[in-house]
Amino acid sequence: MAALAPLPPLPPLPPQFKSIQHHLRTAQEHDKRDPVVAYYCRLYAMQTGMKIDSKTPECRKFLSKLMDQLEALKKQLGDNEAVTQEIVGSAHLENYALKMFLYADNEDRAGRFHKNMIKSFYTASLLIDVITVFGELTDENVKHRKYARWKATYIHNCLKNGETPQAGPVGIEEDNDVEENEDAGTASLPSQPPQASSSTYDPSNMPSSSYTGIQIPPGAHAPANTPAEVPHSTGVASNTIQPTPQTIPAIDPALFNTVSQGDIRLTPEDFARAQKYCKYAGSALQYEDVSTAVQNLQKALKLLTTGRE
C-alpha cells in the first residue's frame, strides 16, 4: 500500500473533548503503522464528540475538521475491505486490540515492566473503546478493557513511586479511577515496529490460557507487527524467533455428521456472527495460528447447522 498523504490539520482540542484526546493521539500514531486503526479511532472520536457537544462554535469547527480528516483518509484507503465492510473492520480492530493486550500481558507475566508494555495495555483499552462504533461490546471485551486500563495505571504508578509491581493477574481495585489517568497512556512508542532480528517478542509464545475474570476469546492471536518492543535485558540468549509446535484442539466428532435441520431458521444476526467467526479464522491463518482457526471454524459450523453457539 502506498504511503498516505498528510491529513488536514486539526484546530486545538476544545476542553469539552478531553475524553477523546488519547483516542485522537492513538489515531495519529497509527496513520503510518495501521491506517485502518487510525480511521476507526477518528470515527470513534467523531461520534463521541458529536454526543458531547455539536453546537458550541469551537466544537463545531473541530468536528468539521475531524470530518475532513475522515473523508481524506477514507478516500486514500480506497476499496480496503476493513473500511468498506463493517464485519471485516470489526474483526481487524478487535484482533489488533487483543494483539496489543496479549503482548502487554505476556510482558507483565514475565515481570518485564517498561513504558512500552504500559503503553500497549493502555492503547488496547482505548481501541476496545473504538470497537463500540460497530455496536455493543462483548462481555469479554468489557473485561479486557477494564483489566488493561487498570493494569496500565497500576504498573505506571508503581514505577513512578519506585515500587516493584506484582506480575501477572491481580485483583482489580474497584475504587481506582483509571478513566481519568493522564500519564499511563502517554509513554512514547518507537516510530517503527521492531524487527524479528532485534526483538525477543515471539507471537507464537503468547499466553492462551484464561486468568482471573478475563477470558481470551477466539481470534486473539498476536501478529508479528505489534508496535512495542522488549527491553534488551530480558536474558534471552538468541534473537532468532523459532516456530513453536502448536497443539491443535480436538474437533467435535458430532460436527462431521451434522447437517442443517429443515426447521432451523437463521437470523441475519446469526449469519453475521458466523461470518465473523470465519473472518477470525482467516485472520488467524495469516499468522499460522491453527488452533484459533479451528476453534472459530467449529463455532461457525455449529451456529450454521444448529442455530446455536
Image (cartoon, rainbow, N blue to C red):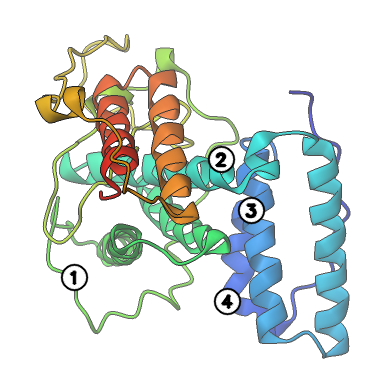
Q: Is residue 244 left or right of residue 38?
A: left
Q: CA distance from mark 3 to mark 1?
A: 29 Å
Q: CA distance from mark 4 to mark 3?
A: 16 Å
Front disc: 3 or 1: 3
Q: Earlier in the sequence, mark 2 or mark 4?
A: 4
Q: Which residue in the structure is indicated by mark 3?
A: 40
Q: Is residue 160 left or right of residue 269?
A: left
Q: Earlier in the sequence, mark 3 or mark 1?
A: 3
Question: 10 Å neighbourhood of mark 4: few (<14), some, or many (≥20)?
Answer: some
Give, as a three-letter code, the residue at label 2: Val
Give, as a three-letter code, the residue at label 4: Ser
The kind of secondary structure element at disc 1 is loop
Q: Is residue 4 visible?
A: yes
Front disc: 4 or 3: 3
Q: Is residue 115 left or right of residue 235?
A: right
Q: CA distance from mark 1 to mark 2?
A: 32 Å
Q: Earlier in the sequence, mark 1 or mark 2?
A: 2
Judge whether 246 appears above or below 58 on screen. Answer: above
Q: Earlier in the sequence, mark 4 or mark 1?
A: 4
Numbered label attached to residue 19: 4
Q: Which of the 4 image quarters holds residue 245?
A: top left
Give, as a three-letter code, the residue at label 1: Ile
Question: 10 Å neighbourhood of mark 2: few (<14), some, or many (≥20)?
Answer: some
Judge whether 64 appears above or below 85 on screen. Answer: below
Q: Which residue in the structure is indicated by mark 2?
A: 88
